[in-house]
Amino acid sequence: MANRLRRLSAREICQGLGGLGFEVVAVRGSHAKLRRTTPDGRRQTLTVPLHRELASGTLRAIFRQACRFVPEEELRSLFFRDG
């Protein structure tokens, strides 16, 4: 059985990613830019729309983007119910 996405707000996503070292560096309109810098100086940036409840496709897109920087195992518990 496939894992189900949780219903999350932008605030919950920002807090969860904050625990992984990301911080909000800019807000423009209805989007927040989150960034963290690796020990070797590389910047890793994610964009999150500031909505009360994010659509499932949007959550999947944020999950895929975050997987470029963070191991999937660390992200699954934030995004998925069974993870």
Image (cartoon, rainbow, N blue to C red):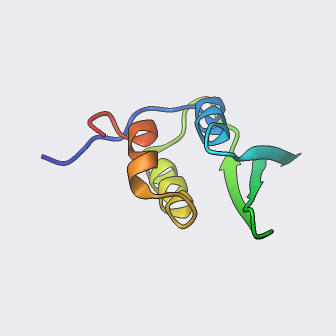
Query: Which residue is pictured at 44% across the width and 32% down the height?
Result: 7
Query: Which residue is pictured at 49% across the width and 43% down the height?
Result: 55
47, 41: nearer the viewer: 41
Q: Quadrant of residue 62?
A: bottom right
Q: Is residue 19 above or below residue 49?
A: above
**Residue reaching furthest to the left:** 1
**Residue 16 visible in this rendered orientation of the protein:** yes
Percent from the top left, x then y, of residue 12?
59, 30
**Residue reaching furthest to the front:** 39
In the picture provided, is 77 more to the left or to the right than 54?
left
Quarter of the image for the C terminus: give it: top left
Q: Is residue 56 above or below residue 53?
A: below
**Residue 30 visible in this rendered orientation of the protein:** no
Query: Which residue is pictured at 67% across the width and 48% down the height?
Result: 48
Q: Is residue 7 above or below residue 29?
A: above
74, 61: nearer the viewer: 74
Query: Which residue is pictured at 39% across the width and 34% down the height?
Result: 6
Q: Is residue 4 above or below residue 8?
A: below
Percent from the top left, x then y, of residue 35?
76, 54
Percent from the top left, x then y, of residue 10?
63, 36
Q: How many marks?
A: 0
In the picture provided, is 31 more to the left or to the right than 55?
right
26, 22: nearer the viewer: 22
Percent from the top left, x then y, of residue 65?
55, 62
